[in-house]
Amino acid sequence: MKPATALLAAASLALAGSVAARAAFFQPVAAVGAVNDDAVVEGMPRLLSQFGFFTDGAGQAPAARVTPYRLNTPLYSDGAEKLRFVYLPEGKRMEANGDGLIDFPVGTALIKTFAFGEGSKRRLIETRVLLHRESGWVALPYVWNAEQSDAALAIAGARMPVVTPAGEAISYRVPNKNQCKECHGLDDAVIPIGPKARNLSGEWLAANLGEVPAGADRLAVWEKRSAVGADAVARAYLDVNCAHCHRPGATASNSGLDLRWEQDDPHALGVMKRPVAAGRGAGGLLFDVVPGEPDQSILLHRMLSNDPGVAMPELGKSSIDREGTEAVRRWIEEMPR
């Protein structure tokens, strides 16, 4: 090989190596301030940052078209602070569906970050994303690193030590991909369970849907529940924390309980209903709910337990929700005998 040719070949190899290195470096990370729509509709990005949902992940500063929202009555998750967001692709909009679950277009992402601690001690633990694709909804969990700079995909879930706001040290569980389906499963499909019109503020619905559907904003705002009747508070709590499993078509439908807000049959709500297959979970009690007798009611007995074979809900918490159980206790106490 002539010297000039050898030099050209070496330069070509060096250039090829440089291009390869740059290609490896420039993986499909969204531009700052823009969500990566390709990542929402296909694949499983290894890092949360590859979606581009936040301009500042640690600060949870949302990118364009990523809108924060809150629920009137939230699902209890060991007292974790939850930061919720919805992303809609350009040109798409969500639609009301009565007081129930909002209809979200394909390309939507629902994002929920769980954090513990306050101020400078706040730590982001995990971010769960629900992605609406042509094939249906896909649930993916991401666990934040110690530096709080990014979160990595955790298909198998994780266990992490945290201290709850009540001061209880627990082994916090990040659900694996299949466990996500246990709460989000309905009729063999994965669906969102949180953003229902009845559990969203009228102000947020008006601003983001352009309307406030009938029956919206009905569930009690949890921080203001003392001003609401016991029945309304407890029924909101059961709808949000239990009904995604205890309803027809869901994973615990064989219990015969239907704890949805719209259910008005006392027997379906457990009143003087014998358990189908509670086993030792019943604690020797006879009925799911005994009016006026919370301590004789299986429903409250299981909510007050931390025994893995007894505790309800089975997933999503490792500690007892004292405020939620008190709300259910008051509801049962005030039932006419």
Image (cartoon, rainbow, N blue to C red):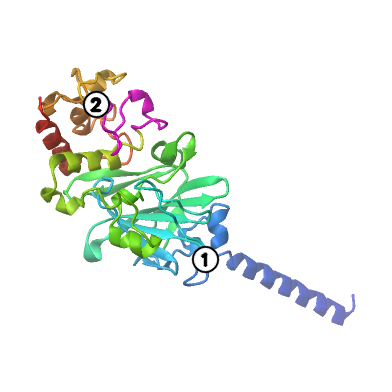
Q: Position of residue 138 (x, y in %)?
A: 50, 47
Quadrant holding the C terminus: top left
Residue topped by disc 2: 270
Q: Position of residue 27 (x, y in %)?
A: 58, 64
Residue 16's tag is: none
Is residue 317 among what the camera can see?
A: no
* Mark 2 Cα shell of 10 Å, populated few (<14), some (14-19), many (≥20): many
Q: Amino acid at mark 2?
A: Gly
Q: Position of residue 259 (x, y in %)?
A: 29, 34
Whether the residues at callouts 2 and 1 have beta carbons within 8 Å, the answer is no
Number of numbered tags placed on the structure image = 2
Q: Is residue 278 left or right of residue 132?
A: left
Instruction: Tell me the SS state at disc 2.
Output: loop
Residue topped by disc 1: 90
Real-space Cα separation, disc 2 to disc 1, in angstroms: 45 Å
Q: Residue at x 32, y 41 (%)?
A: 316
Q: Residue furthest bottom?
A: 4
Task: Name which of mark 2 and mark 1 comes first in the sequence.
Answer: 1
Quadrant holding the N terminus: bottom right
Q: Is residue 283 above or below residue 330?
A: above
* Magenta span dominant secondary structure: loop
- Magenta-drawn segment: 246-270
* Mark 1 Cα shell of 10 Å, populated few (<14), some (14-19), many (≥20): few
